[in-house]
Image: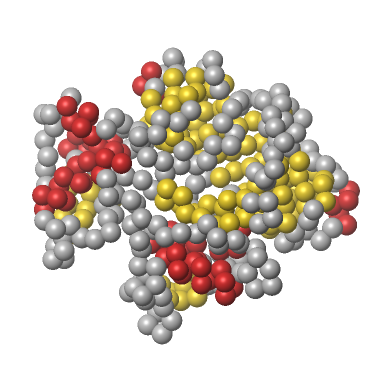
Amino acid sequence: MSVSSYGNPIVFIDGVEITYDSINYKSDGSNKPSSVVIKSNDRYLNDMQLFGAKVTFYLNAGTIDSLPYFRGFIRDTNPSEKGISITALDALGLLSKDQAIIRAINEDYNYDGQTLVQFLLKYIKDNVNIEETLIGTDMLNEVSPVVSLSGYRSSGEAPIDTFRKNIKLNSNDVENIRASRLVMIHGKDVSHIAIKQQQSKNISGPKFSYSDGIQSVKFRERQPINIISGTLNNGRNLVYRHKGTLSTGVRVDNLKISKPFSDPDEFKQKAFKYALDAEKKVEISIDVDKGYYLDIGNNIQLRVTDYPELDGKHVIVGKTLSCGKSGIKCTLMLNKEIPLTSEYLATNQQRELNL
């Protein structure tokens, strides 16, 4: 991993600055809370009421941050002879299992007529922000496409699981399919829940190379999606098989759109392009000495002489960061994007479609 020679990370617990041996931050971008693990031998911590206490972490990498890098609440402590380890989750943890009310959504209690965002707002108002604002909602706007919870039923789940099961890909532009995810935007006094979309493919993002930001690279290929199902508006189910990658083994996915397909040709076209978009994705991690403040869902450009197949645009899908005596270390997890479908088809005109 890369080591930054500059930075002055600071951690506060309930407004009191603490000393630490290490700080480890993690966000995997999968609509789960981000976390911070703090290891410290500060004896003052043994006298504090830690469970539920507020943790505020300022990275201060090359600057003095006015807003925190992370704000969350302590969920676990592990004292030992050498000190104490503290785990904190951001406010999305308040919508997750073990911290949220698990309630069935059924015929008697449901969110028919409400959108997914309206459901989140109501839950936070009724169950979280009771005595004080733990989750700000000023930045929570409707998603595209809008998701209705009419007809949705479950035997019981945490609110964040309801979000995961119902959020849809934005596939209005099939050549630019983008995912949405829940995030916490940390303000001066409170963190606000929001839904962010992956950046458009038209945005190139900052450049990374061995001479500018990259310290090391690791990658592995991922089996591509090659069998896709969909539903017509008359209820008929369709299946598309992407012959170009079937020899690598079967991987099935459902093509998620806001409404059923109007005819088989529309399904075939969108399924083919969706398979192309997934065909050459690889899982990549780069250890970097810049880009600490980049968000998951942002694009970056890679130029890697050792692996020319990785050159081009990528999406940040996860991030880990650690601070200690050796400095700041950061790893970005990436997925590689392929060229626009029109460019890809120009060199693959002989590919057979099979519906």
Residue 140: % across, % down: 50, 59
Foreground residue among 263 and 335: 263
Left or right of residue 269: residue 95: right
Point 27% across, 33% down: residue: 340
- Residue 313, relative to residue 115: is it above or below? above
Locate residue 145: give its quadrant: bottom left
Q: Nearer the viewer, residue 100 or 346?
A: 346
Q: Quadrant of residue 284?
A: top left
With respect to residue 32, does 60 lie above or below?
above
**Can you give x and y, in whole percent of width and height, for residue 166 in the image?**
38, 62
Tell me if residue 327 comes above or below residue 277 in the rendering.
above
Exactly how many numbered labels are in the figure?
Answer: 0
Q: Nearer the viewer, residue 267 or 75?
A: 267
**Residue 327, position in %: x, y?**
71, 28
- Foreground residue among 262 and 101: 262
For image coordinates 69% across by 55% down, the residue present is: 189
Relative to 270, 102 lies left or right? right
169 relative position to 275: left or right: right
Does the rendering let one see residue 249? no
